[in-house]
């Protein structure tokens, strides 16, 4: 529901903090598919995650450690 509220106004930028957290794997995959479709349509997605499988969907990754960019 939170994702639906976030995209209903068709924003150019979507901020997604752990969008697959606490979801089963099938639902998590569905959420990632929606985010990918939004990105393919020209929206910028900023996604924060601890899940390397979710991060693998990104075209650019920024890794932090103790508040500092490390990669």
Image (tube, grey):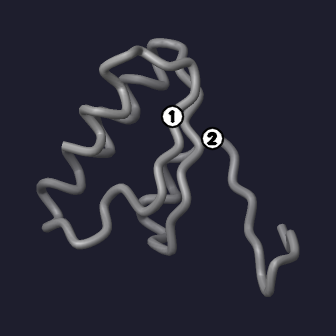
Residue neighbourhood size for the residue with mark 1, other residues' Cα within 10 Å, grouped as few (<14), some (14–19), many (≥20): some
Spot occupied by residue 55 in the image (x, y as percentages of width and height): 52, 59
Res. 45 mark: none
What residue sits 18% from the left and 66% below the top?
23
Q: Which residue is mark 2?
A: 59
Spot occupied by residue 14 in the image (x, y as percentages of width and height): 51, 34
What residue sits 13% from the left and 67% below the top?
24
Verify CB contact (< 8 Å) between mark 2 and mark 1. Answer: no
Q: Relative to 7, does residue 42 appear above or below in the rendering?
A: above
> Which element type, helix, strand or loop, lies under badge 2?
loop
Quadrant in which residue 10 is drawn: top left
Q: Quick one: which residue is furthest to the bottom in this view?
A: 66
Q: Relative to 42, does residue 26 appear above or below in the rendering?
A: below
Quadrant where the C terminus sits is bottom right
- Would residue 63 be found to the left or right of residue 31 on screen? right
Q: Nearer the viewer, mark 2 or mark 1?
A: 1
What residue sits 18% from the left and 43% below the top?
1
Spot occupied by residue 63 in the image (x, y as percentages of width and height): 74, 68
- Sequence-wise, the earlier of marks 2 and 1 is 1
| Measured Cα–Cα span from mark 2 to mark 1 | 15 Å
- Would residue 54 be found to the left or right of residue 34 on screen? right
Spot occupied by residue 9 in the image (x, y as percentages of width and height): 38, 16
Q: Which residue is mark 1?
A: 14
- Would residue 5 be found to the left or right of residue 67 on screen? left
What residue sits 79% from the left and 86% below the top?
66
Q: Nearer the viewer, residue 6 or 65?
A: 6
> Which element type, helix, strand or loop, lies under badge 1?
strand
Quadrant in which residue 19 is drawn: bottom left
């Amino acid at each position: 529901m939170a994702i639906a509220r976030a995209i209903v106004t068709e924003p150019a930028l979507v901020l997604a903090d752990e969008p697959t957290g606490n979801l089963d794997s099938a639902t998590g995959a569905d959420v990632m598919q929606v985010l990918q479709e939004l990105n393919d349509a020209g929206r910028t997605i900023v996604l924060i995650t601890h899940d390397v499988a979710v991060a693998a969907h990104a075209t650019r990754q920024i890794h932090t450690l103790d508040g500092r960019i490390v990669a």
